[in-house]
Image (spheres, helix red, strand yellow):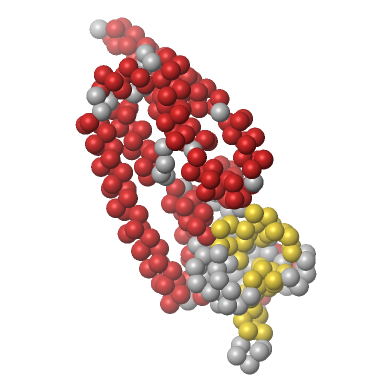
Amino acid sequence: MTAADARAAAGVMLAESDSLVRALPGLLDELSEADRQRLRLIGRDKALESGQFVWQQGDGQTGIYLIRSGRIRSYYVAPSGREVTLAYWFPGNFVGGPDLFGTGPHMWTSVAVEASQLTFLPGPALRKLALESATIAVAVAVSAVVVYWRDGQARFLEILFSDLALFVDILPKVLAACLIAAFVAVLMPRETVMRWVGAESGLLGIVIATLAGTICPGGPITIFPIAAAFVAIGADTGAAIAFITSWTLLGYARILVWELPFFGGEFVIWRTIISIPLPIVAGFLARFIAGRLAARKRSEGDGGA
């Protein structure tokens, strides 16, 4: 097999014949550009020279590495000290399995065979994205098939049961968020909501929704049901859009937990300053479009009458 053919194979397992080498799907192959950008935001670039370890056998798993250039060799160190090569990996592949989300020890060593550029995706952040995005979840599912093919049923089931435990852990939170949203809809006076964040609330309503999104904790499991509940009891579309956009761009929890550790203070300050007007602009734009659509619907109804 030539070097070009090896790269086209996208990950070469040990085989006695070239005809036995099967192409492996890249983790990013089926993702939209938006989802690729979300992965890039949680990723950290890492450059390795030839001979540098990605990790060593027995090290704790913390996530996976996407290979952008170069070549990575994975091998198992037998008790005798002999190195048994398992695979060579090329651009488009990822290394870091069998547990995609980063728990337990590494079962083998991975080392750069040549100068390589990698992107590290932390396990917890990747798990969170997989739960939020259907296409990323599909990509992870494809990767799980690769893990099954590569590492066998026992390891695959171990990871599967671990993820099922995560699902069982999250399910009560989803139910609790829906319950909170139902309480909001019942307990909040409709007149108060309409006065402060309704269609006639003007700039003040958009600003209030923006501030609420900034200080509201929790993930999408909590935020979206609450936003829907407010719309149901009188908040207008513009305020809801401003609330969600503000939570996405300016939420303090996201800044403290995700952005500061990865990007540092200077980046976060400038990104926040640039993002401040965006929820207000989005809110007014949504309010304008919703108003035009409502007026058009009314005119069509009058015309039909």
Q: Residue at x 58, y 67 (%)?
A: 96
The picture places residue 259, in percent across and down from the top left corner, at 58, 45
Q: Residue at x 27, y 33 (%)?
A: 184
Q: Residue furthest bottom?
A: 80
| Number of numbered discs overlaid on the protein picture | 0
Q: Residue at x 31, y 19 (%)?
A: 194
The picture places residue 110, in percent across and down from the top left corner, at 65, 72
Q: Residue 71 occupies which quadrant of the picture? A: bottom right
Viewer-side residue, 20 vs 218: 218
Q: Residue at x 57, y 77 (%)?
A: 58
Quarter holding the N terminus is bottom right
Is residue 155 at all visible to an observer of this figure?
yes
Is residue 29 at all visible to an observer of this figure?
no
In the image: residue 19, left or right of residue 197: right
User: In the rendered image of this protein, does residue 141 appear above or below residue 14?
Assistant: above
Quarter holding the C terminus is top left
The picture places residue 294, in percent across and down from the top left corner, at 36, 15
User: In the rendered image of this protein, does residue 295 appear above or below residue 7?
Assistant: above
Q: Residue 111 occupies which quadrant of the picture? A: bottom right
Viewer-side residue, 33 vs 168: 168
Q: Residue furthest left?
A: 186
Viewer-side residue, 234 vs 213: 213
In the image: residue 122, left or right of residue 90: left
In the image: residue 54, left or right of residue 228: right
The picture places residue 201, in percent across and down from the top left corner, at 38, 15
